[in-house]
Image: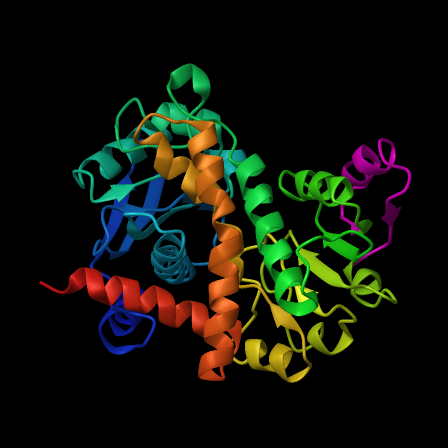
Amino acid sequence: MTDVTDGVLHTLFHSEQGGHEQVVLCQDRASGLKAVIAIHSTALGPALGGTRFYPYASEEAAVADALNLARGMSYKNAMAGLDHGGGKAVIIGDPDRIKSEELLLAYGRFVASLGGRYVTACDVGTYVADMDVVARECRWTTGRSPEHGGAGDSSVLTAFGVFQGMRASAQHLWGDPSLRGRKVGVAGVGKVGHILVEHLLEDGAEVVITDVREDSLLRITSKHPEVTAVADTETLIRTEGLDVYAPCALGGALNDTTVPLLTAKVVCGAANNQLEHPGVEKDLADRGILYAPDYVVNAGGVIQVADELHGFDFDRCKAKASKIFDTTLAIFARAKQDGIPPAAAADRIAEQRIAEARRP
């Protein structure tokens, strides 16, 4: 445990990944809860970010993930134009084994103890029904069901935002926002991916898909026989004539192995943390591949949960999510102006907004 604490302190106070305002270690032995709440910034407003429930290999890995995710939420919320800073929570353990009502209620009490500095929502391993339970102890909870005053599943607006980012990419590269006649490969057609496919088909795109779940593929191909399903992601990214690649499954999709294989000229997808490590964004740029930063184009979900705090209105949210088109274009313009990859340009714009908010 000493090594874990030393690692946390080094990251917080001495590394470029640090600078977090607050990290809370939470434990409730009666329910088995062990959680970490990381608040990166409240410069723009209360920190907003989901709760990840995951069987981490170690407590150190859990803390590191919370710190990284919280920092990412600061950038995502800033670029989405939200009056929220970045935060994230992780609950340590296998949700299929230890998740219980008692544990979620205990977690809700810890979030409530922060007095609104952190607003939580769903993430990997947590769902709308879980947020309904957490909300019984904590009013700073979003992602709840409509029956409990929430907006429900955010996949619809997440997919819509990614589609807007893809349209902006097409506008920047080909001078036309339409995907008509373009071949688009979607890796991961689950909650968000299958809705993105519907947008693409409506726009006249040729769609190629892959997923590790056969039932997810069948849900689309049985309804749309014109969609082509391929065996795996490697096959997808090697597809001849691919114009756009949309990673919509796990993070780290863009790495030293996959980037050299890409045939697409655009990468724009819903997955979080697509760049496996720093430097991948430059590798993409060197190959002439336009990358739409993931935390910009997939912000439709966080736009929805933020709106829930003010009484959810779908049309209002959709209007905000549609601005992802203009934001993405602005990032491409800044990247060209500064001679840097779009991912670096997005970071600069986000950092500028956060810095300006801190000024007296």
Residue at 58% over, 42% down: 160
Position of residue 300 measured from the top left corner of the image (x, y, whole percent):
49, 44
Measured along the vertical axis of the image, is residue 202 above or below residue 80?
above
Quarter assignment of residue 260: bottom right
* Residue situated furthest top in the rendering: 147
Position of residue 191 measured from the top left corner of the image (x, y, whole percent):
63, 38
Does the magenta-highlighted stretch encompass residue 228? yes
* Residue situated furthest front in the rendering: 175
* Residue situated furthest right in the rendering: 225
Residue at 24% over, 32% down: 109
Colouring scheme, one of rainbow, by chain, secondary structure, one colour: rainbow
Image quadrant for the C terminus?
bottom left
Measured along the vertical axis of the image, is residue 197 above or below residue 22?
above
Does the magenta-highlighted stretch encompass residue 158? no
Measured along the vertical axis of the image, is residue 327 above or below residue 256?
above
Image quadrant for the N terminus?
bottom left
132 sits to left or right of 267: left
Most foreground residue, 84 or 229 = 84
Most foreground residue, 41 or 5 = 41
Residue 350 visible in the picture: yes
Position of residue 53 measured from the top left corner of the image (x, y, whole percent):
46, 43
Residue at 73% over, 38% down: 198
Q: Which residues are magenta?
A: 209-232
Quarter assignment of residue 32: top left
Position of residue 41 measured from the top left corner of the image (x, y, whole percent):
25, 57
88 sits to left or right of 137: right
Residue 121 visible in the picture: no
Measured along the vertical axis of the image, is residue 119 above or below residue 20?
above
Residue at 90% over, 42% down: 226
